[in-house]
Amino acid sequence: VTVEPSNATCGFPKRSKFCSLKNHLSCLSCDSSRKDLSHDPNHMIDAIKWTWWQSKSNPGPPGRPLEVNVSIALPMKFILTDDVIIDFYDGRPQVMMVEKSSDHGITWLPLQYFADNCLARFGMPAKDTESTFSTFTEALSPFCTEDCSINDSWDSTDITRVSVSNRLTDLLILGLEKEEMCGALENNTLGLRSFLEITNLRIRLIRPPVMQWNKSNGKQSHLSSSYHYGIKKVQINARCQCNGHASSCVYEGKSARCECQHDTVGKQCEKCRPLFWMTSWRQGSFFPKRERGTANPCEAKALQLPEPCQCNKHSERCELVSVVGMLCVDCRHNTEGENCHRCKNRFYRNANVPINDTRTCKPCKCDRVGSYGKWCRSHGQCNCRPNFVGRTCNRCKSG
């Protein structure tokens, strides 16, 4: 999670305070150097209920709105499956927009606008989040809502939803069958896949929340110490984009990868695994639906020969691979190569036996003190350090 400008977080680089929007007498300190007073950006995604990210109170120049960008980079490409939920702390912004990227932040597309006055802020009419769309294009286009930008002292909810689920439901209402929706996602017709794919989320906070004390006359009141943003949690409901070749993904530190099936490999199962190149890679398909789709697995054809494979008796399996040709598979006896004709690293060719002998490759056994490593040359000589000699570098040099 990154916040721009970098000094917008409360308590960084030095201790500061902020006061509640709903109760100006309630003020708290924040200090990034103390765990109990820190409101780090990562609190937005840490799944701990009582933590939150807190901005400074009005850190910008006087008279200018406090604008902050919050960006969340996902560990890989995902497909949105439901609404993005933003749980604010101490009030929802007057004005903000939510954007997403599907190319790791190179380009951005708006998902939804939020404002107290859509026409004045963004030049577009307001739309009720519960109302339906009239066309497919409209359902997948960004819109502005005024439902989430007013804060009342008696209104305890600070949750804002970025609409995804309602839009997908409206596609069905507009006449798109479920099977057609699967096809639209698979082939990116109607721009559905472009709309749902996501690698990064950006929340552009444009005007902080203020309390509307009296709806009838529109009076508003705020103090500079209450002029801030706070976000408790951001929940992105999505599944891994695995091109139809995996049903789950695993996390590896800050990254993630699909648990690929169908002889595919890659972070998103986007290519065939080695020796399975006879058929070109294709994404898995939802069709035919009655058969639960088509896997489109990668395949390798075994070469059927009247004679054994030419693998120097170190393997009985060979496969014909597109472009590469015939390859021996599962070489034994520490051999490798198209015909199991080379010794693996840390082994060398034993000149005293034929190449098809089980002892054709001998271990280098380089001395760990006298040599530079465990590898040796093709004839078995290890790479000796200065003043060491011998095939394995295990003797001192004379003199």
Image: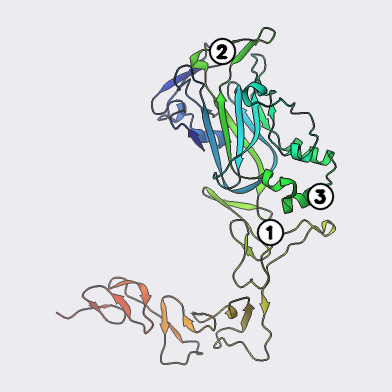
Quadrant of residue 300 within the rendered picture: bottom right
Residue 180 bears which disc, if any?
A: 3
Q: Gap between marks 3 and 2, in whole Å?
A: 51 Å
Residue 211 bears which disc, if any?
A: none
Q: Nearer the viewer, mark 3 or mark 2?
A: 3
The picture places residue 370, in percent across and down from the top left corner, at 27, 73
- Check disc 2 and report the residue beneath it: 23
The picture places residue 87, in percent across and down from the top left corner, at 62, 29
Looking at the image, the residue that sits furthest to the left is 399
Q: Nearer the viewer, residue 357 or 322?
A: 322
Quadrant of residue 310 within the rendered picture: bottom right
The picture places residue 99, in percent across and down from the top left corner, at 61, 37
Q: Residue at x 64, y 47 (%)?
A: 78
Could you classify mark 1 by the number of other residues whose Cα lies within 10 Å: few (under 14), some (14-19), or many (20 or more)?
many
Quarter in which the C terminus is drawn: bottom left
Q: Residue at x 22, y 73 (%)?
A: 386
**In this rendering, position of residue 122 left or right of residue 292:** left
Secondary structure at numbered mark 1: loop
- Check disc 1 and report the residue beneath it: 245
Q: Residue at x 62, y 81 (%)?
A: 318
Residue 305 sits above or below residue 61 on the image: below
Quadrant of residue 392 within the rendered picture: bottom left
Q: Gap between marks 1 and 2, in whole Å?
A: 52 Å
Q: Earlier in the sequence, mark 1 or mark 2?
A: 2
Q: Nearer the viewer, residue 138 or 168?
A: 138
